[in-house]
Amino acid sequence: MKTLEITIKPVSGFGTPLKGDTIFGHICWQAAYDSNLFGGRTIDQLLSDYKANPFLVISSAFVKVGKNGKIIRVLKRPDMPLSSLFDFQGKSKKEIIKERKVLKSKRWMKIPDRGRIESLKKIDYISDSELAEELILSSTEEGQREARGKSARSIIAEFPQPHNTINRLTNTTGEGQFAPFASDQNVFLGQVELILYAGLRGDISIEQTRTALQRIGETGFGKDASTGLGKFTVISAEAIDLFAMGAETPNACYTLSPSVPEKTTYLQTYFTPFTRFGRHGDVLAKSSNPFKNPVIMADEGAVFLPEDMGSVLKRPYIGTAVTALSKAEPKAVTQGYSLYIPVRVEV
């Protein structure tokens, strides 16, 4: 399986977070409507051996910062105790408690261009405001003026988008009724570029994957795409070695998307539970039963310490396929796989 780094640029707000399992679902719908997208194979053919040999594994979106001609990748801080990420040695209990609030706000870790995660305690962790400042400093003068004028403290601004309930049969709001409602959307700073990592089976090409994502970006991703949300452009798609970003002597896997770990022996696991209350897309969203069974996953940023790291390193992803989760579409699957970066955890 070859791995890619795909750079995209948001051009609208988003109603749905760019998480790997949701992006995978959108790509499957693209394949379902155009069998020529992946070399004339139908979606059923692509998923025929998904449990043993997935045709595609895609990550959640992360931030990319370009500075002085170099790339800084900003990933989610590992979901581990602070004592496993920061050095508290020689500090009193009072000093540690005082630092915890500041350290908890450092939600991101910076991976410099061609840098490696040799130790999770030797990574530069930053907060939302520090990340926003990094992006502002790396943008054009016009972008800096715009961001500073808005007093940006985060790369994402959250706000409710007002709507009004409309009867689609009469194209009115009803007799004497006014039924407004609001849906949340997230808008990125104008200078933000995001990166996705994709693992491709040998018979899937870079161009096919790029085309699928371009179409999603044009039509819109996630909730309220019909009102203009979820738009993005694909800037580049290049091969990358995720193992080269990790430790030379790893003993753990840092995941890049929500996943369902396989039933194997782990010495230790660190993760934040994430429950996906799935819902069908496209025409199945209007079916009599549009909802899928909920799936409990380990969110991106999980760290797993397998008993046999050598066998895990034989493939660039961990996790399992999730099936039998829909009564409306028995063949539906959810991506329970995740690409990973091999890291070293000090046990």
Image (tube, rainbow, N blue to C red):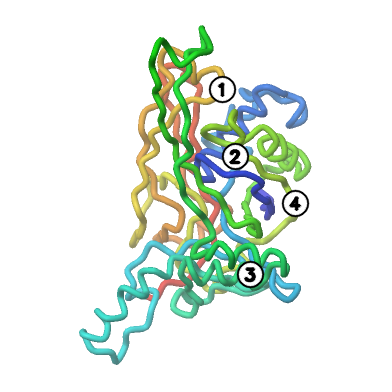
Assess disc 3: are there few (<14), some (14-19) or many (≥20) residues with their C-alpha within 10 Å of its C-alpha.
Answer: some
SS type, badge 3: strand
Q: Is residue 53 visible?
A: no
Q: Is 265 drawn above or below residue 289 in the view shown? A: below
Residue depicted at 52% across the width and 38% down the height: 22
Please tell me whether mark 1 or mark 2 is closer to you in this view.
2
Q: Nearer the viewer, residue 293 or 100?
A: 100
Residue 345, horizontal then vertical, whole percent: 42, 72
SS type, badge 4: strand
Residue depicted at 67% across the width and 28% down the height: 31
Distance of label 4 from label 3 (alpha carbons): 16 Å
Q: Earlier in the sequence, mark 4 or mark 1?
A: 4
Q: Is residue 260 visible?
A: yes
**Amino acid identity at mark 3:** Ile
The residue at which mark 2 appears reads as 230
Distance of label 4 from label 1 (alpha carbons): 26 Å
Distance of label 1 from label 2 (alpha carbons): 15 Å
Checking the image for residue 235, the label placed there is 4
The residue at which mark 1 appears reads as 282
**Amino acid identity at mark 1:** Asp
The residue at which mark 3 appears reads as 72
Judge from the rendering whether residue 221 lies leftward or rightward of residue 303; answer left or right. Answer: right
Q: Cβ–Cβ below 8 Å for labels 1 and 3?
A: no
Distance of label 1 from label 3 (alpha carbons): 36 Å
Residue 75, horizontal then vertical, whole percent: 53, 63
Q: Earlier in the sequence, mark 2 or mark 3?
A: 3
